[in-house]
Image (cartoon, rainbow, N blue to C red):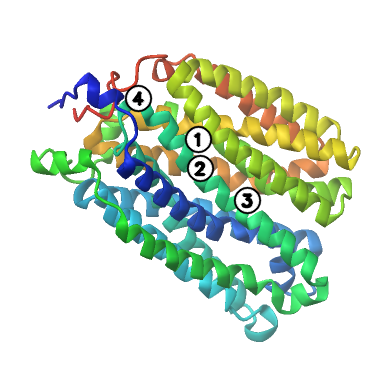
Amino acid sequence: MTTEFTDAELHRPLNRNDYKTLSLSALGGALEFYDFVIFVFFVAVLGHLFFPPDMPEWLRQTQAFGIFAAGYLARPLGGIIIAHYGDKLGRKKMFTLSIFLMAVPTLAIGLLPTYESIGIAAPLLLLLFRILQGAAIGGEVPGAWVFVSEHVPGSKTGLAVGTLTAGLTFGILLGSLVAVIINKQYTQEEITAWAWRIPFILGGVFGLLAVYLRRFLQETPIFKELHARKALAEGLPLAPILRNHLGSVVVSMLLTWVLSAAIVVVILLTPNYLQKIHHILPVLASEANVLATLTLTLGCVVFGWATDRFGARNTMLVGYTGLLASSYLFYSGLPGSPEHLMATYALTGFFVGAIATVPYVAVRAFPAAVRFSGLSFSYNVAYAIFGGLTPVFLSWWVSKEPHAPAYYVGALAILGFALAFTSHAANQPAGKTSGALGSTTV
């Protein structure tokens, strides 16, 4: 069954309800993503506090990054379950549930006793709460993309998912700002003693605020129509997704690999890399990261708008070429002067914004009845593999090759360039592809 929308509906301008949906969704996504990523900004402190003091430093850091990675490894299970009920019970209900499931463990981490107080239970509880965070974010990100894309007209899909992605990256920016403030306001001894708890407690409060804000959102028109027509997917939709949409799954997973390389390496791991490998002061590394994350947030909106205006293929070709060139310029010039560091990191952050093309292509790759499940499965399985293992893999590779981040990001930028030539990224008018918002064919 296929639902047809008029040309006027596909190309109408954004209205007041659209802006309300985009702003509340982006704000909620920012607060939830802050909760998920704040861990990485304090991973060195957590490694010191939650593992035995006689453990070698490299092993403590590796295990701390391992717990960070566990959040990614938990994403598929949480994402698949939340997405299944999102396709069955509604986008809004699961969209709200995911952020509640994030707020509680974040607050718990902020209140968690350390190894000195409760021994081996400390890292085990930290691991448990990190897994719960991963399960929550597994439903949040694809759910948010589906939610906003099904609210706006098809011709504004790129701007919608780009704005939402900017909201998610603003959560990283918020984490960076909090890390800078903590590092400036407190001594290292104070941070280790108690100040590290502040960002996690704030995150729990932020998350509960986002739960409240999402009460003001409405269910998507697409889901309402599917429900009215009794066209919802029956049973667990993974089997028909893998059988009928395997090409969409593969392309979405590869695009997610590109996205994970850009976010995890350039934004999340680089501040620690700057300090450990190039001996750049923590404050300068944090300030440069804040600037890069700000340009990333702007880049997501720009590349999302460009996708609507010029098509996915053209935007991907320009964006990933820029990411390849700018990341090489940035990493090859380290440590360099502070001015050079800030400028090249900011430029690279802007081209990381090309990841806004990923949800545009992936959302449109699946029909509406199984869109949440198809996108969630593809995105979360790929992110669990590539995003979860990248920190551990790169921490090993950097010990052998200092320029490993440049090689890794460059290789994935080339992959993104190549994926622009797939049929899923064809420069077709919005709302006219098999995965468009108007299609409910299963």
| Discs 4/3, front | 4
- Distance between the Cα atoms at labels 2 and 1? 6 Å
Name the kind of residue labelled 1 in the image. Thr
**Residue at the image position 58 percent from the left and 78 percent from the top:** 112
Question: Looking at the rendered structure, which numbered label has been put on residue 383?
Answer: 2
Which amino acid, by three-letter code, is at mark 4? Ser
Mark 3 crowd level (few <14, some 14–19, many ≥20, 10 Å Cα): many
In percent of width and height, residue 210 lies at: 42, 61
Q: Which residue is mark 4?
A: 155
Q: Nearer the viewer, residue 393 or 339?
A: 339
Quarter holding the N terminus? Answer: top left
How far apart marks 2 and 4 lie (CA) works out to 28 Å
Q: Which residue is mark 3?
A: 173
> Looking at the picture, does residue 404 appear above or below residue 235?
above
Residue annotated with mark 1: 256
The mark nearer the N terminus, 3 or 1, is: 3
